[in-house]
Structure formats: C-alpha cells, structure tokens
Amino acid sequence: MIDNFQGKTAVLTGAGSGFGLECARIGAKLGMNLVLIDVQQDALDKAEAEMTAQGAQVLARKVDVSNAQAMEQLATDVQERFGAPHFVFNNAGVGAGGLVWENSVADWEWVLGVNLWGVVHGVRLFTPMMLAAAKADPAYRGHIVNTASMAGLLTAPNMGIYNVSKHAVVALTETLYQDLHLVTDQVSASVLCPYFVPTGISQSQRNRPTDLAADKPTASQLIGQAQSDKAVSSGKVSAADVAQKVFDAVASDQFYIYSHPQALGNVQSRMEAIVQGHNPPDPFAARPDLGDKLRNALRGC
C-alpha cells in the first residue's frame, strides 16, 4: 500500500479522458509526478496543460499501448526522468460488440491489442523497475492497478470480444497479485472492474488505427453500439468517483475495485453455476425486458 503520495510517480495510460484523466487530477492534487500516456494527441495536450498548471511535474507521451517497442521506449523515458514509478495504472481501453462470430480479425487484433496487450506491456516493463526499487530501498512502496471491467467477471451476450479481453485482464491481475506476494511485501496489485460509467469508451472507434480499420458494421454490432451508448451515457457513477476508489484501494491494498457493487449478484450467480456444473445462467434474469428486447432485435436482423 502507498500511504503517502506526495512526490511519488504515477504512470497513467488512457490519461486523456475517463478514469486516467480523473486519476491524474487526483495525483496532481496529491503532489505526484505524472506520466501521462494517450493515443489521442489533442486530449493528451489538454491533460498535460491542466496538470502542469496544477504544479505537477509531467511527462506526456503519445503512445499506442499495444505497440511493444513504443512501450519499451516509454519505460526508458520514465526511468530517465523520474526513476521507478510508484503507481502504475494500466488503464487504456477500447470497446467493441456484436455477435462473437461476426468480429473480424482486425476487430480482435485491435481490442486485444489495447485492452490486453497494453496491460501486458505495462506489467512486463514496469514491474521489474518497481521490484528493483523495492530491493534497493526498504521504504519503497509500489502498486499496479489494471483496468478490467464487470465484463471481466460476467459473460453478457453480444459483446464477446470485449468480455474475452477483460476476463484476460482479471486473470492476469489476480496472477500478478499472487506472483508479487511470493517475492515482495513492498509491491502489490489491484484490478478495477467498473460497470457502466460515462468515460468516452463507447466512442473509442475514433482512435482505431487505420491498418486495423473496421469492416462495415454488422447489424449485431450496430445494436451493441446503441445499447452501449445508452447504458454508458445513463451511468450515475462518475469517472471521478471511480478514480477516488482507485486511490483508496491503492492506499489500503484492496485488490478488487468495483464501481457498482450491486452488480455482483450476477457474478455470484455465474460462479455458483460454475461450481455446481450448471449451464450459464440467464444474464437478464433481473431485467427480462432487456433480454427480450435484445433477442427480438437480433432475430429481426
């Protein structure tokens, strides 16, 4: 756990909007050095200007987190500027939906590239730096937070590609936590599993690389996008609320971070079905009207 953030260094991916930006704002208020990473230059520039005006020391880099070489250069730049970071927030993410067999290879490469490989690169590059700092200084404390989703604990239909990426992040982070606790008491990890929170992820197609351009969307993908837009935009928990939960978790070494704990009933139903060997439960048991609406829309395509 980190009990004092003053003068510590935070590395934040997806820092131009959503949870990354709100965590940067908290970090600036707490006197942290900030490494801001985003793929959208105008959003990154705006975030850098805001944090610099708050008095924070800022290193801003436009980086595609799915790119191994770019991430390796970023890690080198961080080490040279601030040394080993204390808080790493592997947060950058994109959204995509549709029936799972309708996703193209480009869809899979884009979503897994950002949502999973971005986290993999953050873990593989910054963890060794943090462990080396811990070994050199008994007072050093570090924490890694990876952004997954409630979709990493559930299997909602018509969003399989996103579910796969986020389940992988949950498994990676749980294993990271166990691995870290084998070798050190000074570095820990958490996984963030937000539900529907207005962050801008539903518009993530704006930053999709041209070499992974989307095909013409299928009917199921259009339906999924419309549902996602509606659910995200109507969310009552803000990105700022979630960012505060992230800092609280880092300070208390809390592993699972939820924006909507009330949604855990569906997780419990899924886990009970797994343990009992039952078929997957109806994801719309609590809201059959939503299930009927989606089923009718898809069968009417």
Image: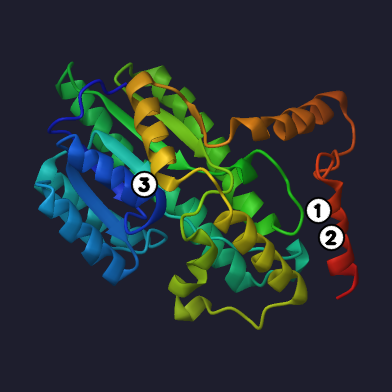
Image quarter (top left, top right, bottom left or bottom right) of the N terminus:
top left
- The local secondary structure at tag 3 comes to helix
Q: Give the label, 2 or 3, closer to the camera.
A: 2
Splitting the image into 4 quarters, where does residue 273 fall? top right
Q: Amino acid at mark 1?
A: Leu
Rendered view: 65 above or below 31: below
Q: Which residue is mark 1?
A: 290
Callout 2–callout 1 Cβ contact below 8 Å: yes
Q: Amino acid at mark 3?
A: Gly
Give x and y (percent) for residue 246. 39, 34
Q: Which mark is residue 293?
A: 2
User: In percent of the image, x 82 and y 60: which residue is there?
Assistant: 294
Rendered view: 136 above or below 51: above
Callout 3 crowding tier (Cα within 10 Å): few <14, some 14–19, many ≥20 = many
Q: Amino acid at mark 2?
A: Lys
- The local secondary structure at tag 2 comes to helix
Rendered view: 271 above or below 238: above
- The local secondary structure at tag 1 comes to helix
Q: Which residue is mark 3?
A: 122
Callout 2–callout 3 Cβ contact below 8 Å: no
User: In percent of the image, x 51 and y 51: which residue is there?
Assistant: 116
User: In percent of the image, x 67 and y 31: which residue is there?
Assistant: 264
Q: Between residues 53 and 213, which one lies in front from this camera angle?
A: 53
Q: Give the label, 3 or 1, closer to the camera.
A: 1
Q: How many marks?
A: 3
Q: Between residues 78 and 76, which one lies in front from this camera angle?
A: 78
Give x and y (percent) for residue 69. 31, 61
